[in-house]
Amino acid sequence: MKLSKKSEYGLRALFELTLAHGKATLQRHDIAARQRIPVEFLEQILLTLKRAGLISSRRGVNGGYTLIKQPNEITLGQVIRLLDGPLAPIGCVSKTAYQKCSDCPYANKTRCPVQQIMGTVRDAIAGILDHYSLADFAADHPKS
Amino acid sequence: MKLSKKSEYGLRALFELTLAHGKATLQRHDIAARQRIPVEFLEQILLTLKRAGLISSRRGVNGGYTLIKQPNEITLGQVIRLLDGPLAPIGCVSKTAYQKCSDCPYANKTRCPVQQIMGTVRDAIAGILDHYSLADFAADHPKS
DNA sequence: ATAAAGTAAAGTGAGTTTATCAACAACTTA
DNA sequence: TAAGTTGTTGATAAACTCACTTTACTTTAT
């Protein structure tokens, strides 16, 4: 049930970009310094966020990164799925990346006891994370 | 946000033991066969469940494992914590195994944006898993 | 005594996480 | 256009975790 550093850093980076949204572009070392993230690792993360169309970057002297979508259009759920994979604790209850469990004795037959409760957990997690956007994220922490 | 195989197998094993509760003791290969778990791995799991006082075992010819507590006294949350560690997605929001995040720029200062939302997630997960017992687990699947 | 069963710890191979590094491409300003 | 700054990409790798496996006991019933 763990969130990876990758996702954590990704969220922190997007938090900074949200605070700067509409005001400034941030360079990787700014983000890295403010959130204490290893720069090279951060690059990797920013790259996948860019490929996913969440942020854009400008090279050259006054370059840096900017949010490309509105903060309220990006949910934490999206971000974590992007960086960490499905939210579901177990493949067979994932809605965005369903995977049949190959070895399970209940597969394709009757309902599986584990599957049932984990489905509930998944819904709870997704319910929170898919309804919490970067805008909410930043709104809770106006200063800093 | 993943549940390990260890926890999954542990839950399945306890499910079988719950069904047999009061009726029979189960041997490791019975459990393994019914739930398709590698026997040797299962042993390891049963051992930690035993050390934690959830089950007891008898050696020798007609040995096997039995639930030692009442099914409604064991929650899935307990089991998963035992086998997988804290439910919290991030150490600094765990209630049973709190860990200060060393590198976080918000540590000890103001509230951390990530910490806040992850706290909510933790509460949701724990809320479900700590109120769902083996008894509920088995009640939902009377036959099989 | 012996065979069935559980106990315990260490080992293993594959994969993931968390980075680091180097070379390159592109952009900006002077 | 040259110099300098920044982003892009891919390779590499240490450390760790996962999911078992192996090996070597110890206990118990018959």
Image (cartoon, coloured by chain):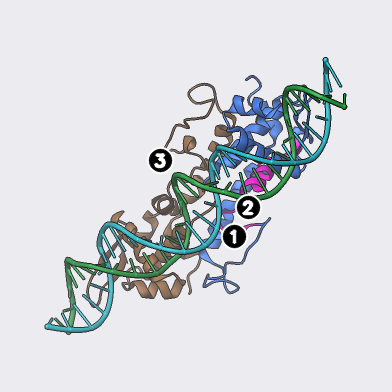
Chain colours: A blue, B brown, C cyan, D green
Q: CA distance from mark 1 to mark 2?
A: 8 Å
Q: Tell me how far mark 3 sits from mark 1, CA to CA.
A: 26 Å
Give the labeled residue for mark 3.
Answer: B96
How many marks are shown on the rendered structure?
A: 3
Instruction: Please say if A14 is above or below C30.
Output: below
* Chain for disc number 1: A
Q: Cα distance, mark 3 to mark 2?
A: 25 Å
Q: For mark 3, give the secondary structure.
A: loop
Q: Are marks 1 and 2 in contact (CB under 8 Å)?
A: yes
**Looking at the picture, which amino acid does disc 3 mark?**
Thr
Q: Are marks 3 and 1 on the same chain?
A: no
Mainly helix, strand or loop, the magenta region? helix
Q: Secondary structure at mark 2?
A: loop
- Which quadrant holds residue A9? top right
The type of residue carrying mark 2 is: Pro
Q: Amino acid at mark 1?
A: Gly
- The numbered dot on residue A91 is 1
Task: Say if the magenta span includes residue A84.
Answer: yes
Q: Which residue is mark 2?
A: A86
Dot 1: element: helix
Residue A6 in the image: x percent, y percent? 59, 41
Q: Which residues are magenta?
A: A72-94
Q: Residue at x 51, y 39 (%)?
A: B90
Q: Quadrant of residue A48?
A: top right
Tell me the residue at 69%/34% (across/down): A134
Q: Is residue B106 magenta?
A: no
